[in-house]
Image (cartoon, helix red, strand yellow):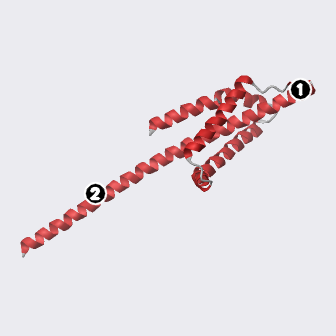
């Protein structure tokens, strides 16, 4: 279980690149006060936690209600990731739109794109933290349930042994 968590964490860490997001976050929030920066980060984490909890609770139900099998959902997610990767590699060329935009508008568009990227990364980082916390809590809960089941079985066995011993003693005393 721990190896699965470590593997999942490493994959998400590599995809999200939180260390690379820190400079972007700082540059995009430089005009904000320290309190406002904290609020932006906390808001991003809270929203990602809400999304995580919603899909953790209702995700499987939604897929079942829409009659979408998990392998089909995984394949669709893989295609979306492939499209994102291709757009990152080859870029989206829109020369006509870029020529129409003035230099100031182009910079504004780039700034907006950077902000969106930063917020996305902050959301994802918060989501991962919450997800890992929930997975660890669930793991501890499952372990506790197993221990309680084992103790219950041992108690039942002990009670059965005592009953059998009492029956033997009763038969011997006749």
Q: Quadrant of the C terminus?
A: bottom left
Q: Residue at x 24, y 61 (%)?
A: 158
Q: Position of residue 62 (x, y in %)?
A: 62, 53
Image vertical order of residue 171 relative to residue 54, above or below: below
Give me the disc on residue 154: 2
Image vertical order of residue 3 relative to residue 60, above or below: above
Q: Position of residue 85 (x, y in %)?
A: 67, 28
Q: What secondary structure is marked by label 1? A: helix
Task: Please name whichever residue, 101 or 128, is drawn nearer the observer in this view of the structure.
Answer: 101
Relative to 131, 35 lies left or right:
right
Q: Position of residue 154 (x, y in %)?
A: 28, 57
Count of labels shown? Answer: 2
Q: Residue at x 11, y 69 (%)?
A: 169
Name the quadrant containing residue 107. Answer: top right
Image vertical order of residue 71 relative to residue 64, above or below: above
Neighbour tally class for label 1: few under 14, some 14-19, many 20 plus, Cα within 10 Å:
few
What residue does disc 1 label? 96
Q: What secondary structure is marked by label 2? A: helix
Q: Position of residue 90 (x, y in %)?
A: 73, 23
Name the quadrant containing residue 58. Answer: bottom right
On the question of residue 69 being in view, the answer is yes
Q: Quadrant of the N terminus?
A: top left
Task: Please name whichever residue, 49 or 75, is drawn nearer the observer in this view of the structure.
Answer: 75
Q: Residue at x 70, y 42 (%)?
A: 44
């Amino acid at each position: 279980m721990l190896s699965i968590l470590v593997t999942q964490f490493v994959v998400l860490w590599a995809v999200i690149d939180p260390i690379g997001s820190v400079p972007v976050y700082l540059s995009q929030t430089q005009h904000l006060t320290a309190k406002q920066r904290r609020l932006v980060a906390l808001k991003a984490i809270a929203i990602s936690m809400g999304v995580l909890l919603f899909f953790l609770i209702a995700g499987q139900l939604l897929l079942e209600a829409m009659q979408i099998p998990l392998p089909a959902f995984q394949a669709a997610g893989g295609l979306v990731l492939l499209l994102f990767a291709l757009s990152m590699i080859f870029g989206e060329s829109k020369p006509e739109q870029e020529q129409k935009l003035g230099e100031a508008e182009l910079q504004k568009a780039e700034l907006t794109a950077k902000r969106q990227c930063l917020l996305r990364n902050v959301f994802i980082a918060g989501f991962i933290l919450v997800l890992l916390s929930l997975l660890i809590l669930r793991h501890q809960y499952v372990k506790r349930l197993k221990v309680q089941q084992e103790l219950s079985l041992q108690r039942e066995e002990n009670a059965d042994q005592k009953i059998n011993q009492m029956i033997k003693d009763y038969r011997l005393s006749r």
